[in-house]
Amino acid sequence: MALCCNNSPFDCLLLDLDDTLYPLSLGISQACKKNIDEFLAMKCGLPIEQASSLRVELFKKYGSSLAGLMALGYQVHPDEYHSFVHGLLPYEKIRPDSQLRELLLSIPQTKIIFTNSDRKHASRVLERLGIEEELFQKIICFETLNPELFDNKPTSAAVRQPPTVVLKPFIAAVEAAIDIAGFEPHRTLFLDDSEKNIAAGKAVGLRTALVGRSTKTKEADYAMESISSLRQTIPEIWEGEQAQKGVSGELTLLKVRNELDAIRPTTAPIQA
Ligand SMILES: [Mg+2]
């Protein structure tokens, strides 16, 4: 297992994408909900108002509209769904963010995107933000979490079951991300704008940071209104840089880190 070169308590940052790397106020999520309503109305033959209620119900019960449609037996390919709900988003609202790019570049740890969105959407958002994909060691997205939905192996009708869709906030999705990332959960910092996702991260032992909120929830170790205040909120990420300034400082930080490791609970991952 690779360890970070500095004395920070973190080896890896798992970063959500939507409403985390750019603000909720851009209205991308709102536009996405509208597109989902139109997709549900079209697929299920419903008036748009009923489709909106159905979206809320499916989200509550199955975690996403796509998962709900599949569970209910609708023949929907993920690519068809994503091209409709993401393909028509007002991406022009996402502007290049050079401060965010500088911030990400300054983070010494392994950085991994962990999003429920499809790969094409993730690429498009990063491109709009002016952030190179190479800045991240991996992009964990819908396709990564659900590879079996994309293999075209024929299944006999007799054994065909509605497929399980793995997404945050399901524990299975977070565990899969931890496996793919390959770092100890207690040394991995998970940033997300969803309280439910943060709770799932905490349940499997991740360190957690709620983005878009100034107050912490029970499961959030940190909270910040915007990712732009990451350095002020979690200076420990850059702890090694401070330690390199002087031998005495370095020794002090190492001592603090050892003490933290000694008192940190060793939470075993919950088996989904
Ligand atoms: Mg999000």
Image (spheres, rainbow, N blue to C red):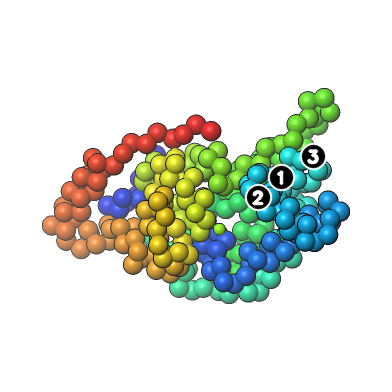
How crowded pointer 1 is (Cα within 10 Å; few <14, some 14-19, many 20+) is rated as: many
Cα–Cα gap, marks 2 and 3: 16 Å
Judge the density around disc 3: few (<14), some (14-19), many (≥20) Cα neighbours within 10 Å. Answer: few
Contact between marks 2 and 3 (CB within 8 A): the answer is no
Q: Amino acid at mark 1?
A: Gly
Is disc 3's CB within 8 Å of ligand 1?
no
Tell me: is circle 2 under 8 Å from ligand 1. Answer: no
- Asked whether, in this view, residue 26 is left or right of residue 49, the answer is left
Q: Residue at x 67, y 37 (%)?
A: 164
Residue 269: x %, y % from top left: 44, 35
Q: Secondary structure at mark 2?
A: helix
x and y percentages locating residue 6 in the rendered image: 29, 53
Q: Residue 227, can we see it?
A: no
> x%, y% of residue 143?
65, 46
Q: Is mark 1 within 8 Å of ligand 1?
A: no
Decide which of tag 2 and tag 1 comes sooner along the chain: 2
Instruction: Depth check: give the residue in front, 48 or 179.
Output: 48
Report ligand 1 position as a quadrant: bottom right
Q: Is residue 48 left or right of residue 165?
A: right
Mark 2 to mark 1: distance in Å?
7 Å
The residue under the point 29% across, 42% down is 264
Please name the residue that numbered disc 3 is placed on. 73
| Residue 79 seen in this snapshot | yes
- Which amino acid type is shown beneath numbered disc 3? Gly
Q: Residue at x 84, y 55 (%)?
A: 46
Mark number displayed over residue 68: 1
Q: Disc 1 or 3, which lies upstream in sequence?
A: 1
